[in-house]
Amino acid sequence: MIDFVDERMNRSVPEFPRSPSQLLSLLETFAQSREHWLKVAGGAKGELLEHAFSLRKWEPFEVALECGTFVGYTAVRFATLMWRSCAKHSVARVMTVEVDPVHACIARHFLDLAGASRLVEVSIGQVRDVIPRIVEDFGVRTLGFVFMDYKGSIFHCDLESLELMNALSVNSIEVADNVALPGAPLLLWHLAFGPSWTLVVYAMMEFLEPNTEDWMALGRYKGHAGEAPPAPKSWQRLSWHTDHMRRRATGLRPTEGDMFEEDRVAYSRYVRRHFLDVGIVAMPWQGMVETDTDGG
Ligand SMILES: C[S@@+](CC[C@H](N)C(=O)[O-])C[C@H]1O[C@@H](n2cnc3c(N)ncnc32)[C@H](O)[C@@H]1O
């Protein structure tokens, strides 16, 4: 992948926003042409992220956080969105956290190629360990946007830490990926039934998997207003089981075999049934629409 991008990327001085869009298309082409699936938020998921980013007016001190960088695909997108919406500030306004140091180095290289390294800081570590540093570095109530795209069974714990540490601005946006596949039930419960959040859920097909439905959650923080009621036991079990599927998808359960498309389609349907049973429904993602920012 690095060779594929390096050979094709325009090596002259990176020029915003052309270099980031060139980099994004190269990574998308790589994912398509080599039949080498990349676990990035591309296609409809990328559109939804752009929509979510546009829902708020950014203050000069505010920061966007991505949890789970992988090779920096979405981090490059965020750099462009932040640059467009924030009068081109020259300091890092996007922080992205990655536990795998090799992924983090690839992401830094791609951000550099795109000319976006001054806008994005790639931090190496587990999200839960980096959270306190975010408050130390940027101050309280500075996170305007949080994108969670790593291990869905712990999203709710890390989001609660961000709330407890007062890291989130009022009206900040939380987007979570893979809510239905393999699933982030406890995060969805927290956003749906906690008094501090309003929630909209979108359904779309997984990037480059036209038959596999996934959901993304879009929450808006109202400020700390108390705790969500505890999630039912069946949802706790489901959350545990999503980790089992996550391990299987990465080849860590060889006796159970690989996950094929039909397994993924069926598992997504199984997870969604839990959500529908308590009245959580998703709107089909229809593409970008013009929205007013809330000024918040
Ligand atoms: C789905 S990929 C992220 C894709 C990226 N957000 C994008 O759209 O371009 C998930 C990444 O999260 C990382 N990860 C998993 N658990 C993590 C944790 N607890 N803290 C930080 N990163 C984690 C994985 O190593 C992997 O690179």
Image (cartoon, rainbow, N blue to C red):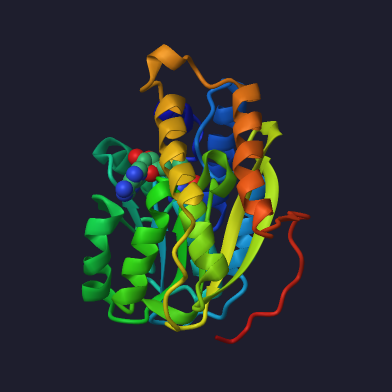
131 horizontally vs 267: left or right: left
Where residue 213 sits in the image (x, y, percent)? 68, 40
Residue 255 position (above or below residue 30): above
Q: Is residue 287 visible?
A: yes
Q: Is residue 11 visible?
A: no
Toward the front, the furthest residue is: 233
Q: Nearer the viewer, residue 120 or 287?
A: 287
Where residue 224 sits in the image (x, y, percent)? 42, 82
Q: Nearer the viewer, residue 53 or 216?
A: 216
Residue drawn at x 59%, y 87% as measured from the top left: 295
Where residue 168 sits in the image (x, y, percent)? 40, 76
130 horizontally vs 273: left or right: left
Q: Quadrant of ligand 1?
A: top left
Residue drawn at x 38%, y 69% as measured from the top left: 93
Q: Quadrant of residue 94?
A: bottom left
Q: How many marks?
A: 0
Q: Quadrant of residue 169?
A: bottom left
